[in-house]
Image (cartoon, grey):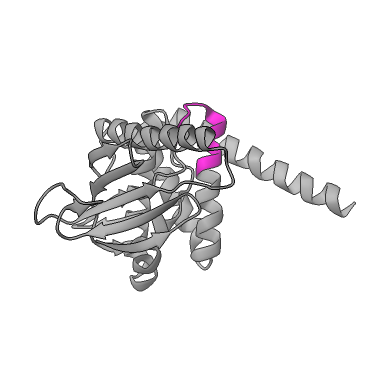
Amino acid sequence: MRMIKQGAEAKIYISEFGEYFGAELIPGETVIVKHRIPKRYRIREIDEKLRKERTVREARVLHRAKEFGVNCPHVYEVNLRDMVIAMEFIGGERLKEHLEEIPIEKRLPLCREIGRQIGKLHEAGIVHGDLTTSNMILREGKVYLIDFGLADFDPTLEAQGVDLHLLKRAMESTHYTWFERGFEAVLEGYAEVRGEEKAEEIKAKIEEIESRGRYRERSWVD
């Protein structure tokens, strides 16, 4: 087992032998192991409570997302003693790079599929919290959403609008030469799942969120 990423909240390991923290899981299968690490600056009881709540929530989010047809990792095991989730390894190409390597006529269908996956996620009452093309993998022609560490159960239009607004900003930063067409395709795919009425509500909410940001910028300058 080797560590592939360390974030503020957790260490991410990959195991090609189905072992984690000395326990055998699925022999011969590659798994991702997410360990929420203790924070020494927090009171121990509070730290354990927070890590447990976040570990349980992430596992439940992934389980519910699967029920609604979202392409995301399957949870194999949750260990609340060590605050560990063992989940399916999604091998494939990260969309951040892949989308820049293919012509625009192939990018847009993938963006529509991104929208469909997000639509299913929102139908489940879940917001991802970190929607970027860095957290999307193309495997065998299917788009998978990964890294649900900031995900939460929130069916409100505000939360869903923020979710998509963050994706729009991320696409503008990473895919700036074509992000407008790409994000339009995302919304088209979203509408296929959630319907035109809900998609229009989401568009209006995104515009409202953007206008708030512009207002704050003007107020700061003034």
Residue 131 x, y percent position in the rendering: 45, 49
Q: Residue furthest left?
A: 27
The residue depicted at 55 percent of the width and 60 percent of the height is 172
Most foreground residue, 111 or 156? 156
Most foreground residue, 59 or 92? 59
User: Is residue 184 depicted above or below 121 in this figure?
Assistant: below
Query: What is the span of residues highlighted in magenta in the rendered image?
Result: 152-163
Q: Is residue 21 left or right of residue 163?
A: left
Residue 117 x, y percent position in the rendering: 34, 42
Residue 202 in sight here? no
The residue depicted at 78 percent of the width and 44 percent of the height is 215
Residue 160: in magenta span = yes
The residue depicted at 43 percent of the width and 48 percent of the height is 37
Most foreground residue, 33 or 205? 33
Residue 191: in magenta span = no
**How many tags in the picture?**
0
